[in-house]
Amino acid sequence: MAAETKAKVIDGKAFAEKVREQVAAHVARLQAENGLTPGLAVVLVGEDPASAVYVKNKGIQTKASGMNSYEHKLAADTSEADLLALIDRLNADPSVHGILVQLPLPDHLNSELVINRIDPAKDVDGFHISNVGLLGTGQKSMVPCTPLGCLMMLRDHHGKLAGLNAVVVGRSNIVGKPMAQLLLGDSCTVTIAHSRTKDLAEVCRGADILVAAVGRPEMITGDMVKPGATVIDVGINRIERDGKAKLVGDVHYESAAAVAGAITPVPGGVGPMTIACLLANTLTAACRANGLAEPEGLTA
Ligand SMILES: Nc1nc2c(c(=O)[nH]1)N[C@@H](CN(C=O)c1ccc(C(=O)N[C@@H](CCC(=O)O)C(=O)O)cc1)CN2
């Protein structure tokens, strides 16, 4: 029998819709008052099916928010020199305020080199080494979309986060590390745990906020969750169960929801916030590039 769900379910789909509405309202004001339309260029190399869907959705949502969308689809065997030349052109294009290179890139391309070629002011993914350094030192930066989305949901649920114990399970550059920096910025006491952490369950049980970003299906189980804790599940894992394809997070939802105070589901939790925050970052980049006030509530 399924365990009873006690936790409040944090609805990322609904939250993302509100963020997109805020972005669209701000974009309409920018157009009316400043004659400015933010533009986002997304670069996809190759035919990875999941990446193609994410890029398509980015284009649809960018246009729906009133911004310009520029899609660049390149063949899987595109050379590094050609990709870098495209980034140089986008860096120099004043109608492009945000540039995103969809990851993962094909193996023959050096992701670090490619990402670090993007103008940091247009790096709406927040992956450029300059933005990483700015975030790590508490300075104004572009913030990676997935952690920014998690932070927005946590602030909305808790109000103030100061003094709370946060455990981030996972140490990736894209989610784990920036998530930890953002929580530290909001004065949480932060622990970064990972696959080699000793007694991971005990470390997790100390968390008021538990962020799972390990990329292992259902690794975080209910016995690892402190009663009443807020659980943010960043994992998106495609598994097969009972002969059917299924999408699950890094958290075993039923057992964790029986103990947690609040929890994000998969799908419909963190995932939709990633693209909503990409739109927010593009708007922020356009405002900064034009010396205009940044949108309130849409930045870290
Ligand atoms: N350059 C980047 N590449 C990648 C990023 C990124 O932030 N920047 N993140 C992921 C992919 N991603 C956006 O690019 C993304 C992943 C998941 C979702 C989402 O809405 N997920 C849904 C489920 C969708 C499904 O059925 O597959 C959900 O969780 O509800 C949006 C965007 C890697 N690459």
Image (cartoon, rainbow, N blue to C red):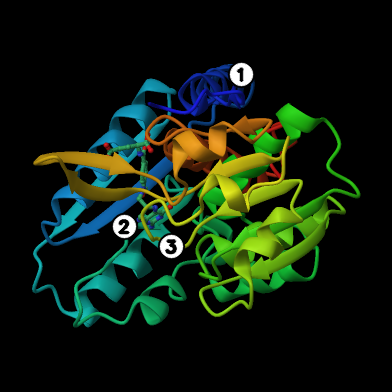
Left or right for 24, reference 33: left
Left or right for 131, reference 24: right
Snapshot quadrant of residue 35:
top right
Q: CA distance from mark 2 to mark 1?
A: 29 Å
The amino acid beneath tag 1 is Arg
Tell me where residue 168 appears, x and y as whole percent: 64, 60
Tell me the residue at 25%/69% (across/down): 105
Left or right for 151, reference 160: left
Tell me the residue at 62%/49% (across/down): 289
Residue 222 vs residue 25, the one in the foreground: 222
**Is the CB–ligand 1 distance for label 1 below 8 Å?**
no
Tell me the residue at 43%/33% (across/down): 272
State which tag comes first along the sequence, 3 or 2.
Answer: 3
Residue 112, relative to residue 249: is it above or below?
Answer: below
Q: Which label number is shown at residue 91?
A: 3
Is residue 296 visible to us here? Answer: no
The amino acid beneath tag 2 is Gln
Q: Which label number is shown at residue 102?
A: 2
Residue 247 vs residue 25, the one in the foreground: 247
Residue 238 vs residue 129, the one in the foreground: 238
Residue 145 vs residue 215, the one in the foreground: 215
Label 1: which residue? Answer: 29
The amino acid beneath tag 3 is Asn
Where is the N terminus found, in terms of image quarters?
top left
Mark 3 surroundings within 10 Å by alpha-carbon count, few (fewer than 14), some (14 through 19), many (20 or more): many
